[in-house]
Image (tube, rainbow, N blue to C red):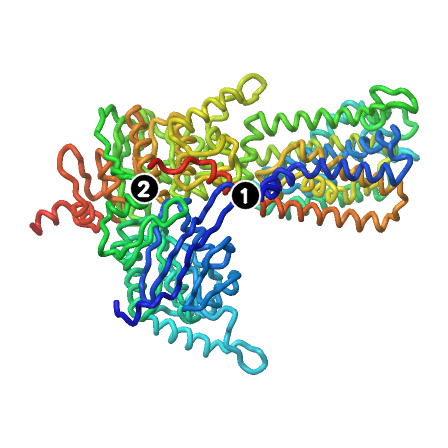
């Protein structure tokens, strides 16, 4: 009886327990796991994923999905590079040669615009959010292929592109072989903090929770639900573009499949981190836990030289496990909390 | 009742069920005889739902025995309970709306022909005949979604009776029903009782108990507070048993009535209301009543922008009222408490704090657009204290509160917007006796602060207790207006007006 009382609390913070457990497991499995290079690698991998998850969290909390964010990432990374590099081989860009700073601004606006289009179709067009963003996922990926004819666009060895690589490639602080703080990791950390503040301490975030929890009641409370949902999609699109910029810096040369399949990891990280797919529930801190857990597992399996096929299987199992945890949360939260509330409320005065 | 019918079909003896921190059932004994309608009463959280969950096998009791038709059932689960003939008819019966009535009646046991094809002819014929046996005269080829809630409940009861139910639990069946359907349902239930069917009847409406039940068991704080034949008990006694105290009805003294706040002139909306003339004054409580669909509910939702308002003139504080959305209504100082608490009132999974401050977040913003959390907490805890919201903390999810406290959370949310006009749509629906009184007191306090209050309700006694004026709608028109200070208002007068009797016809018939 006593132990069962703590189950909901445990389920809510399970992510951190698992993270520590998994971390210790890999430390014993691989001698190089606990090295500064590897830890940096985990954080670097978590950086791109983290930005996508922050954007996705806003949309999920409002009770919607944004499946298109991985394509938005790909298109924006590619488009930004295209604007910077020459049209000649080996760059295969657009030959526009615009200022890289301008190009960064352009892609962030472009990503936000894709999000706005998603939001318009869903709120004004009254179309199903899952299908709309799934269609957007296909459209953007297809456009990306048509645009480049399948050829990668490369900024390697083209000096002006250095600025474009700053976010994904440079470090703020580095002592060789000892410590390295990549710009991207710091940026993602900041975005999580801002995301947390916006979600919990700004009207926008609070209204988003209400919309995800009960849209009709939110509307009857004087909330412009459609506008808030559109704003959530704009944030998701803009952050996907930012993640694209960061990833572009890491890879240097952009293939048409950049970001392909990322959305599964994004959803898994969010759900493992406690973001409810029904909307209205979840925190940025939890989402961060989900991101770190998946990045740690990914890196650990890599070091253990697990075959890529089995990595897929394990990722699938992790998503299922996340859904299992989510189901347990629903199951345990209700009766337990209800009994507690009944017990705590003073009964009628006699 | 005949003596041969007096054997108990269900006997629950010394049932104990504890949850962490609360003894939900403390040695409860409860029995239902063959051919009786046994009312089970109690406030929310008194233990009646838990007791029914034990009977339907959803909860396993910690101790105690359950006997159904004389047979002891241990380790009852939902499947076994069903087999033993325990049938639950919920407020909204579970049917497949897109299928015909016949298919729903036969779902799971459709008559088949050779080759596994459904024998449609036989199914329709048999279904018609079977429902006919229970005096349900209805075309079984109609779609389930086209039936009324009352028809659905009757079909569900009949379906339970085909399956030879020992006892049928009716859980607040009349809450979603319009008045005339309630009578129909009662008539039907009484007829089935005459044939030997037994019912457990759960309701918050005490008048109904006297109308339909034979026996009554009252629960309070997890124990049985009293058992009695209905003919040996009075309504005040029943209320005392339920609440554990002498609950007086809340009578509101008329206060000072101020200037007109909302003036409606010649408002029309086809299919909803016609030529509405209505003024709400500061400090006044006005009751709006009528048959379901006769106009008051539509007017309330129209004014709040949940439905179109129609054409005509509406002035709020001498300025033209801009309708169309709850956002603009709240901005102009018109707040609405919805009838559908779960659908429109609360965000159940969010905390009391989130719910109460939801409509005033803009006023809590400080620099950088951040919510001033100290100010927010002060606001919420003030409302928790003033309205007497019983909750372990302001971070508790609203879904864990009782119905009455959930309703108070909605009232707090509305009051926080400091409205000039407050429209309450069936504010006491689904809340217990004690909470009803408290809610009415809150309404009174708001009116004393100068809010113009309108209450849409068909609880006539409540309207008479708190309103300065009662406006009666009939088929979309305001047919009568009663003023408390001008004439004594009686239930009979109100009912006559609700049924469409105008002043002229009353005078003519006298």
Q: Which residue is mark 2?
A: B244
Dot 2, how many residues are within 10 Å of its Cα: few (below 14), some (14-19), or many (20+)? Answer: some
Q: Chain of mark 1?
A: A
Q: Is residue B287 left or right of residue A34?
A: left
In this view, the residue in front, A341 or A315, is A341
| For discs 2 and 1, the disc positioned in front in the rendered view | 2
- Are the numbered discs 2 and 1 placed on the same chain, yes or no? no
Q: Chain of mark 2?
A: B
- Whether residue B329 appears in this view of the structure is no
Check if mark 2's residue and mark 1's residue have beta carbons within 8 Å: no
Q: Which residue is rendered at x = 42% and y = 77% of the image?
A: B126
Dot 1, how many residues are within 10 Å of its Cα: few (below 14), some (14-19), or many (20+)? Answer: some
Q: Which residue is mark 1?
A: A336
Q: Is residue B178 left or right of residue A52?
A: left
Q: Which residue is rendered at x = 71% and y = 33% of the image?
A: A288
- In the picture, residue A290 is in which quadrant? top right
Q: Is residue B4 left or right of residue A238?
A: left
Q: Judge whether B360 appears above or below B367 on screen.
A: below
Provide the secondary structure element on which disc 1 rests. Answer: helix
- In the picture, residue A226 is in which quadrant? top right
């Amino acid at each position: 009886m006593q132990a069962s009382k703590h189950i909901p609390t445990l389920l809510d913070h399970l992510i951190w327990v698992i993270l520590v457990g998994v971390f210790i497991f890999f430390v014993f499995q691989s001698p190089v796991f606990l090295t500064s290079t590897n830890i940096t690698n985990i954080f670097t991998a978590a950086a791109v994923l983290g930005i996508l998850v922050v954007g996705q969290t806003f949309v999920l909390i409002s009770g919607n999905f944004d499946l298109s964010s991985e394509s938005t990432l790909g298109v924006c990374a590619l488009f930004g590079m295209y604007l910077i590099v020459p049209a000649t081989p080996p760059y295969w860009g657009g030959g526009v040669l615009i200022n890289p700073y301008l190009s960064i601004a352009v892609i962030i606006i472009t990503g936000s615009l894709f999000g706005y289009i998603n939001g318009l179709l869903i709120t004004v067009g009254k179309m199903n959010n899952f299908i709309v963003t799934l269609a957007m996922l296909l459209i953007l990926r297809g456009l990306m292929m048509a645009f480049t004819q399948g050829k990668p666009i490369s900024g390697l060895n083209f000096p002006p592109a250095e600025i474009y690589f700053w976010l994904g490639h440079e470090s703020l602080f580095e002592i060789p072989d000892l410590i390295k703080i990549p710009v991207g990791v710091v940026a993602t950390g900041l975005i999580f903090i801002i995301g947390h503040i916006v979600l919990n301490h700004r009207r926008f975030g609070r209204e988003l929770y209400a919309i995800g929890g009960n849209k009709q009641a939110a509307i009857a409370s004087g909330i412009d639900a459609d506008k808030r949902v559109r704003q959530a999609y704009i944030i998701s699109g803009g952050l996907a573009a930012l993640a694209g910029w960061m990833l572009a810096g890491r890879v240097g040369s952009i293939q048409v499949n950049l970001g392909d399949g990322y959305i599964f990891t994004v959803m898994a990280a969010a759900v493992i981190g406690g973001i409810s797919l029904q909307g209205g529930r979840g925190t940025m801190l939890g989402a961060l836990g989900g991101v770190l857990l998946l990045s740690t597992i990914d890196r650990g399996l890599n070091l253990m030289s697990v075959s890529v096929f089995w990595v897929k299987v394990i990722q699938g199992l992790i998503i299922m496990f996340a859904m299992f945890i989510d189901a347990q949360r629903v199951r345990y939260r209700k009766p337990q909390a209800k009994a507690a509330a009944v017990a705590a409320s003073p009964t009628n005065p006699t | 009742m005949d003596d041969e019918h007096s054997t108990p079909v269900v006997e629950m003896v010394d049932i104990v069920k504890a949850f962490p921190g609360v003894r939900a059932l403390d040695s409860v004994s409860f029995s239902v005889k063959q051919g009786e309608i046994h009312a089970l009463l109690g406030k929310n959280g008194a233990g009646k739902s838990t007791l029914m969950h034990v009977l339907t096998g959803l909860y396993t009791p910690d101790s105690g025995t359950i006997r159904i038709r004389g047979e002891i059932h241990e380790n009852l689960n939902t499947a076994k309970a069903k087999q033993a003939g325990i049938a639950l008819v919920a407020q909204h019966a579970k049917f497949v709306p897109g299928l015909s009535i016949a298919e729903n009646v036969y779902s799971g046991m459709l008559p088949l022909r050779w080759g596994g094809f459904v024998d449609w002819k036989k199914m329709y014929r048999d279904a018609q005949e079977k429902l006919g046996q229970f005096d349900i005269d209805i075309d079984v080829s109609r779609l389930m979604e086209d039936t009324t809630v009352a028809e659905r409940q009757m079909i569900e009861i009949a379906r339970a009776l085909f399956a030879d139910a020992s006892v049928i639990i009716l859980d607040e069946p009349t809450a979603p029903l319009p008045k005339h359907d309630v009578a129909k349902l009662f008539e039907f239930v009484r007829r089935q009782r005459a044939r030997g069917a037994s019912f457990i009847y759960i309701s918050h409406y005490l008048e109904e108990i006297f109308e339909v039940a034979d026996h009554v068991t009252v629960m309070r704080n997890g124990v049985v507070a009293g058992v009695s034949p209905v003919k040996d008990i009075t309504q005040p006694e029943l209320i005392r048993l339920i609440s554990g105290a002498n609950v007086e009805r809340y009578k509101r003294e008329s206060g000072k009535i101020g200037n007109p706040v909302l003036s409606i002139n010649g408002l029309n909306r086809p299919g909803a209301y016609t030529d509405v003339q209505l003024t709400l004054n500061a400090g006044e409580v006005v009751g709006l009543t009528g048959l379901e669909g006769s106009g008051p509910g539509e007017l309330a939702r129209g004014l709040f922008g949940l439905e179109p308002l129609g054409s005509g003139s509406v002035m709020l504080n001498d300025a033209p009222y801009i309708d169309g959305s709850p956002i603009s209504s709240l901005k102009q100082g018109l707040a609405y408490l919805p009838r559908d608490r779960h659908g429109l009132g609360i965000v159940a999974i969010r905390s009391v704090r989130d719910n109460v401050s939801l409509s005033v977040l803009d006023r809590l913003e400080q620099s950088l657009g951040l919510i001033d959390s100290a100010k927010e907490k002060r606001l919420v805890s003030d409302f928790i204290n003033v309205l007497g919201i019983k909750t372990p903390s302001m971070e508790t999810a609203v879904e864990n509160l009782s119905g009455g406290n959930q309703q108070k959370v909605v009232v707090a949310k509305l009051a926080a917007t400091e409205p000039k006009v407050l429209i309450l749509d069936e504010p006491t629906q689904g809340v217990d006796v004690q909470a009803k009184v408290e809610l009415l007191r809150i309404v009174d306090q708001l009116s004393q602060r100068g809010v113009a209050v309108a209450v849409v309700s068909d609880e006539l006694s409540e309207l008479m207790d708190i309103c300065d004026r009662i406006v009666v709608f009939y088929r979309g028109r305001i047919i009568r207006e009663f003023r408390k200070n001008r004439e004594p208002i009686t239930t009979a007068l109100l009912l006559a007006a609700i049924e469409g009797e105008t002043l002229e016809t009353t005078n003519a018939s006298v």
